[in-house]
Image: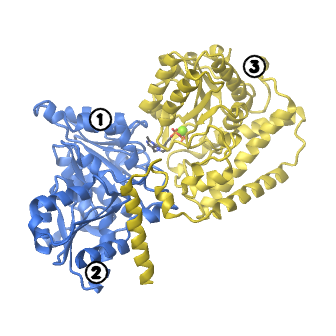
Chain colours: A blue, B yellow
Amino acid sequence: MEGEQKMSVMTIVQAINNALDIMLEEDKTVVVFGEDAGVEGGVFRVTEGLQKKHGVERVFDTPIAESAIVGTGLGMALSGLRPVVELQFDGFSYPGFNQIISNVSRMNNRSRGMYKAPMVIRFPYGGGINALEHHSESPEALYSHIPGLKVVVPSTPHDAKGLMIAAIESNDPVIFMEPKRIYRAIKQEVSDDKFSIPLGKAKVLNEGTDVTVVAFGTMIRECQKALVMTKEAGISVELIDLRTIYPIDKETIVNSIKKTSKLVIVAEAPTSFSVGGELMAIANEEAFLYLEAPPKRVMGFDTIVPLAKGEPLYMITPERIFYEIERTVKF
Amino acid sequence: MIFNDFDPKEDKIFRVIDNEGKVINKNLMPDLDDETVIQAYKHMLFFRAADEMAVSYQRQGRMYTYPPCIGHEAIHAAAGMIIRDQDWLAPAFREVGIMLLKGVTMKEIFLYYMGNEEGSNFKKANHVLPISISIGSQYLHATGIGYSVKHQRKDEIVFTSIGDGGTSEGDFSEALNFAGLWKVPVIYTIQNNQYAISVPVRNQTNAVNLAIKSYGFGIPGVKVDGNDFFAMYATYKEATEYARAGKGAVLIEALTYRKGAHTTSDDPTKYRTKEEELEWAKTDPMIRLKKYMDNKGIWKENEEELIEKYKLEVDKQFEEAENMAPYKLEDVFNYMYVDMPDDLKRQKTDYEQFLTWKESKK
Ligand SMILES: Cc1ncc(C[n+]2csc(CCOP(=O)(O)OP(=O)(O)O)c2C)c(N)n1
Ligand SMILES: [Mg+2]
């Protein structure tokens, strides 16, 4: 069976497009909409061609109103459709924030299960593209903090496709954050068939014994570059890609920490009150006696992501990851 | 009064000159001497030259994404010539012209689009907020400033602006509702350039026009030909007199066309036709004003020479921006708080240690 699968080389953009296409084809309740998502196919072209293929009633442009995109999406989700809504950038998810945290995340609980909210709210996230303000944010902690939401961040085309399909099929609302900086930077063979990757399962990308490095999304690529340096330095790194931020895969993380006794977390969001903080709490709660060095967060400053001139000072580089890994291992 | 005579409910449009520069509404033609008209045209020439230069610097990879203002010149010139030094401006992002007349420099504009926050620190411009990238926010801030200056009995009024696309945001409606209630001295402009990136106005709203939205908030509204300098000037004049007399806010829909791409990373051929562009080209604000001046025989300057002069000036400012001192680590931290928390200081020190290590590896 495996051998018969037809594969295509895809970028993350193409993989998500493919996932949406498959789901639009298979499930007639799926609708896709957002600012410029219809005719133009989105400013990053993630929904390109979908309106032509599936019709303007199922793939369409909306006026600029994020609260309305999320709120009307919820209405559709409550009444028989499965909306996949696009918010144009990370920083423009905030005008829709109230609908997300006050309604989308709560409807199932509020109605004691009578009304579910099977919707996906997707947006590109992260820095490193020399963008204007509000176009470089990493709000995964904000959304993971909200009870009722699942939060997904893929790092490869294969995962992006499988996770998107799982997100659309999920009966719980999913925040799907797409790593815009590597939207087209990584190409990978991906099956043309429908497949899904379960939400809530991390992936061990590299097995190792000296230190556990946990990352997700864009930072995976930076970690992999750092791993070239750690290898030269004779440090054996276990690299874990979270893939889903919430529900977080404690088992995979804890097992790894028990093995390596050291933890480094890499993410580009501000350090304080972050996913990094959560991972350190997990390490403390579940593997305290195994730790041989203080866990380390290699994360953004507690500042706004600077505009392009200052951005290189903010972004986490492979060198910086290596530096912190080495210090942790040598502790 | 323009605001009563051109009722948005009847989808009327206020216009003073036609595409040939002929005055078609003598009664409402603003009383401007030739010198002022010539000055207005020179402003517009400068805006367009600066805009073209900005686009070309971006293409050369010397600055990042830029939203061209080409086509919006009449709106910017009229507002910019009427706004006073003490008045406030809460700008959207397609506002370079009015910002320049308020005292912002091209150097600052360039700095911003080169990716330096210093470009929002308008050293010589009084009461100009940084541009609002998050669409709609600025309308609320303008309403708040309106309340504040009224409350403090200051002789100041407020200008703010939004795109057609921005009128769909909740902030737009909320700001105007408060404005009507509080009777704030704010001039709200909608620069309706027909598109929100790829989405045409007809796919943004079912309303016959955007000025009609003023009815819902109990403030006067008018739809104006935004490519007609005289119409824009007369409208702003009346609006500012209304606001200064303590009567409250107004909403102006200025009809124009985004002649350029949405930003330098957009390709309009994907969603609009050449024919449409050519149709709108006939209404170009600069051609019309020029024709008016030619009809009157008052334009005696050498336009090519002027443009060359402006481009040199713009280039000088661009170079100054390019030669700014390099961005330093403290620039990332220093303005996050007025009173910087200790932990943030520590993050900076930690990073400096990393930099020292990095140096030592070289
Ligand atoms: C809150 C928010 N949502 C989305 C965007 C992304 N965006 C930038 S410009 C734009 C279109 C704006 O159209 P319009 O208001 O007509 O202004 P114009 O660009 O035509 O001047 C969009 C959707 C944004 N900047 N802010
Ligand atoms: Mg517009």
Task: Report whether A197 appears left or right of A190.
Answer: left
Mark 3 lies on residue: B28
- Vertical position of residue B226 compared to residue A183: above or below: above
**Please, what is the three-letter code of the amino acid marked with disc 3?**
Leu
Mark 2 lies on residue: A230
The foreground one among B330 and B267 is: B330
Marks 2 and 3 in Cβ contact (< 8 Å): no
Task: Report whether A256 appears left or right of B160.
Answer: left
Given the image, what chain letter belongs to the residue carrying mark 1?
A: A
Tag of residue A99: 1
Q: Position of residue A165 (x, y in %)?
A: 21, 53
Q: Residue A161's quadrant in the figure?
A: bottom left
Given the image, what chain letter belongs to the residue carrying mark 2?
A: A
Q: Is label 3 within 8 A of ligand 2 (CB to nearest ligand atom)? A: no
Given the image, what chain letter belongs to the residue carrying mark 3?
A: B
Task: Estimate the spatial distance between the alpha carbons at disc 1 and disc 3, rounded to whole Å.
Answer: 47 Å
Q: Position of residue A33 (x, y in %)?
A: 34, 42
